[in-house]
Structure formats: structure tokens, C-alpha cells
Image: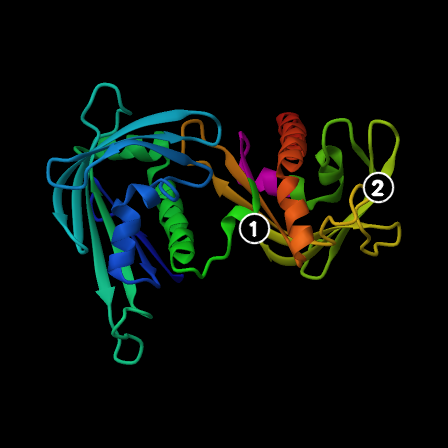
Amino acid sequence: MARPENLEQTASEREIVLSRVYDAPPELVWRAWTDPEHIGRWWGPTGFTTTTHRIEVRPGGQWRFVMHGPDGTDYENLVTYVEVVEPERLVYRHGGAKDVEPVDFTVTATFEKLVTATFDSADGAGTRTRVTLRMVFPSPESRDFAVREYGAIEGGRQTLARLAEHLRRMSGAGGADGDAFIISRVLRAPRDLVWRAWTERDRLAAWFGPKGATIPRCTLDVRPGGVFHYCMRGPGEEESWGTWTFRGIAEAERLEFIVSFADEDGRAVRAPFDDTWPLGMLSTVTFEAHAGKGGGTVVTVRWSAHPATAAEQETFAAGHGLMRQGWAGTFDRLEEHLSRGG
């Protein structure tokens, strides 16, 4: 839903300005920004979740919330609304209490309707909105502190990207996110090193798979149409084969591939444990800077059945718990591998 228009600039030494254009009318964007049913579903950088304790969007009203980082860190936050002009403008103060994060600034958020003679319609379909955030800090030092300690610029960029995803869901164009399996992990390593761990054969074979598994044989060709074909040996010496067939690659940012169980020749086969498990799963792996304390890289793995019958989709959904357990162990092994220098 978002147009490929992202602008980041520093208007002064005390400011951070972020802007993004969305394929949604201002009324829908405003609702996503102010309705407690929606704001907690997208607010925060990649991997973060948000719990709202109270919210009252009016001059003098407050939004009290906790942001939960993907590394388990909780961030207490307080917003006090100064100006509310629906659906055009919000002004609010962030911080100002002893029990919240020590970052104080004032935000002006504007929601600008973009109209073209050929694209606009009476019901708002096709209308776009430019959201601009202007964050003003008390001093250049406090701005630099927020950027250095909290990843304020990168975190803002990621938050606006998450809003785009949520607006797609609100408009019915984003698919059923609840059907996907999603897991994130913060890795205390630079993004280029994490990327190499996923895209170089010997590095990938050293950590991939749940605890107790090994990869005794594999080939890897990281390009669109290329394949990672591997043999995985379990702790009981049982063996299974699998493939990743790459569809899209953005260097150090994103991998997209189809995951399948396979035979020794690389042909897709049914899962050995259930005939109704999907024959293929679309996997998207993203690599982003961690916009939180401590830095590092957030890796997010998203799997969805592709394609799938109703029975296969039901089996896939029922298997989320086991997938989470398996990926938790796999991420543990990746962390250990990276701690040794990758």
C-alpha cells in the first residue's frame, strides 16, 4: 500500500523528520494512528509489540503504553496530546515522567491528502496520504542520544513501514496475516555478518537446523532460481532432505524462497510426518538494524503455506507451535555460531 517514497532528513540539529506516502485516505490512516484496536498492531520498529494501558486522543489526553522489544526489553512510554485536528494533524509530547524512558521530544504528525484528477474518487478509493513526522528535541545532544541509544531514525523508518503493512490489512488487500508463521530474533552481530551466515554454504551448514541436527551434505546457489539442497541428520541419525528455491534476493536485506521437503535428487516430496503438510512454503527472511538498546540485527522469518488446500492450511496453522520451538533452537545455534565470529 505504501508508495516507494521514503524521505529522511534532519531539518536542524534538534530535529528528526520522517515522511512516507501511503495508498490510503487520511481517514483510514488517522484511524490506524489513534484507535487502540489498531495502533498496537503496528506501532514500533520491526519485532516490537506494544501494550496500551490507556489512550485518550484529545488535547491534554494521554497514551500510556509499553513497547516490548524482540530481545525481551520493555520500554515504558508516555505521550501527552497537545493538538488534535482530525484527520489532518496531531501534536504530542513524548516523555515527561520519571517512570518512562529518558527521552523527551515533541512530535508534529501531519496527514496530507494527495489528490490527482485521474486517481481520486468520491469514496476515497485510490486516495493517497503523505504522513510526515517532525520530532523536535530539547537540544542537539538529546537528539543524538535518542539516535545513538534507541535507533530513533531507523526505528521511525521501520515503524512507518509497519504502518504500511497494517493499512493493507485494514483495506483487505494484505492477506490473512494470522495464517502466517512469524518469528523474530535480535542477534548481537552486524548485519553483513548475519547475512553471510545465511548465504555462504559452510557458514549456513554450521548452524542451520534445530538443536541436535547437523547438515552433513548440501549445495547452495544463492540467486533467483538457485537452490539450497541439503541433507539434515537428526540426533537419532535419521536423515531427511530439503530445498530452498530462491525467488528474490536483496543484498543484506531480504531473502525469499520456497521451502520444501525433498528427495536426494532435489525433487519436492510430502513431509514424512503428515501427508497433509503443504508441499511448499513461501519463506521471507528479512535483516534489519535493531532499533533498541544494544544494537545488533533483527532477523524475521515469515512462513506461509504456498500453495495450499484448506486441509493443508489447517495442518500448517496447527503446526505453528512446533515450528516456533524448532526455530527457537535454530536461532540459538545461529547465535552461538555468530558468537564465535560467524
* Residue 278 position within the rendered picture, expressed as x and y whole percent measured from the top left: 71, 52
Q: Report the residue at 21% width, 29% height from top.
A: 95
In this view, 217 is above or below 187: below
Total labels drawn? 2
Q: Quadrant of residue 299?
A: top right
Residue that carries the numbered disc 1 in the rendered image: 254
Q: Report the residue at 62% width, 39% height from top.
A: 320
Q: Quadrant of the N terminus?
A: bottom left
Mark 1 belongs to which amino acid?
Answer: Arg
Q: Quadrant of residue 145?
A: top left
* Residue 219 position within the rendered picture, expressed as x and y whole percent measured from the top left: 80, 48
* Residue 124 position within the rendered picture, expressed as x and y whole percent measured from the top left: 28, 68
Mark 2 belongs to which amino acid?
Answer: Ser
In the image, 137: left or right of 118? left
What is the span of residues highlighted in magenta in the rendered image? 183-196
Q: How is the image coloured?
A: rainbow
In the image, 79: left or right of 154? left
Task: Tell which circle, 1 or 2, labels the residue nearer the N-terminal end.
Answer: 2
Q: Which is in the foreground here, disc 1 or disc 2?
A: 2
Residue that carries the numbered disc 2 in the rendered image: 240
